[in-house]
Amino acid sequence: MELEEVTKKDPDTSEAEQLAAPPPAPPRNGKRLLWLLLIPVVLAIAAVFGAHARQKQNQQLAVTTKSLEVQTVNVIHPQRGKASSDLTLPGMIQAFSQSPIYARGDGYVRTWYVDIGTHVTKGQLLAEIDAPEVDQQLNQARAMLSQAETTLQLAKLTTPRYQELIKTNSVSQQEVDQNNQNLAAQAANVKAASAAVSRLEQMQGFEKIVAPFDGVITLRKTDFGDLVNAGNAGVGRELFRISQNNVVRVFVTVPEEFSQQVGPGTKASMDVTALPNRHFPTSVTRTTDAIDVNSRTLTVELDVPNPSGELLPGAYANVHFQLPLNVVPLVLPTSTILFQADGPQVGVVNGQKQVELRKVTLGHDFGDTIQIATGVRPTDSVIANPPDSLTNGMQVAVQAASNNTRGN
């Protein structure tokens, strides 16, 4: 109908005007309808493809999340340690006997005969002290003793005479009694003078400084002309120090956990850094039999023969104890232990592939490995190198089980 209207000629216009007029506009309603039909189809197709892509991404994210939730771990099994424990502890070597030597009397050092490193015997002369005051006091005491002895001798002669005179009433009984008392007094004076002489003779003997026992001089703190005193007029001055080294004492502090296994007679061996590849067999001689409240250790002493003197007092030593164990503990690598606020723990994988955090009681630490007293069993699968993020109930995947723990 529209075509008919377009082709229909206007009766009021000429043919030339009709020919010169522009052609009629094409119809637009058909294209509009076509676009209206195509757009919803395209949008629907795009929505379908978008939903499919999102679903695929969600599936991939779910797979990734699930794989991240399952931690892959390696597990090991606890191993039994040795039936005897090789306990190595540091020790301090000391001389069996060590004594500082002081002067017993006042005076000046006249001379000394020994120096550090000198081996001496008991009673050997070490030094001499010049004490003229003591010498003069001794001379005076001897003179007084002689005077008292003379007076006593006179009293001994006079007393019998008075005993005879009283028989003839030539003297009074009072005079006889006085002579008897004088004899007793003079005898006491002689004893007192004799004691004074003996004391000063001993003081004079202290002018010679001698060794109290066999040993070696480890310190000399005097020289010619030094003033020394006996300590009653001030602090005594140490002249020498002597050590007896043919047997040395080794003191070791043993942790409380081993205190019941270390006692007199426990076998041990000792080595020192200065003598490599040398081992000195010994045994525990005595213990303090008490735990120190500060260090929670037991102090033990081992006596080691040292006839050649190669073990020097003051040196450090490594003492090895072979201790039998009543219960052989389990051993795990130190890297399996989690040190957290609740104490030491290990991660164990149960039958449902879930993590169980268990508290453990630790024993002796051997460095790479450590004893486990309680908390795990030999059949438990313990996680090696557990991460700090490990929690109870976490799902894990066991990659490989290995038994690479060596007992100590």
Image (tube, rainbow, N blue to C red):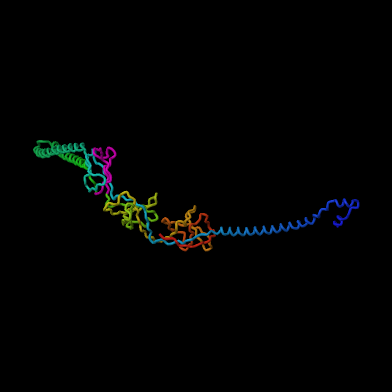
| Residue at the left extreme, as displayed | 168
Q: Is residue 194 above or below residue 215?
A: above
Please give left or right for residue 245 compared with residue 153 in the image: right
Q: Which residues are magenta?
A: 214-243
Residue 217 % position (x, y): 26, 46
Residue 214 % position (x, y): 24, 49
| Residue at the front extreme, as displayed | 16
Q: Residue at x 26, y 53 (%)?
A: 308
Quadrant in the rendering for residue 171: top left
Q: Residue at x 91, y 51 (%)?
A: 12
Q: Quadrant of the N terminus?
A: bottom right
Report if residue 257 is visible in the image: yes
Q: Quadrant of the C terminus?
A: bottom left
Foreground of the two, 403 or 408? 403
Residue 310 % position (x, y): 29, 52
Please give left or right for residue 354 compared with residue 215 in the image: right
Residue 289 % position (x, y): 35, 53
Counting the numbered discs, the total is 0
| Residue at the right extreme, as displayed | 11
Report if residue 393 is visible in the image: no
Does the magenta run of residues contain 170? no
Q: Is residue 204 above or below residue 245?
A: above
Foreground of the two, 246 or 159? 246
Q: Residue at x 88, y 51 (%)?
A: 16
Q: Is residue 43 above or below residue 109?
A: below
Does the magenta run of residues contain 230? yes
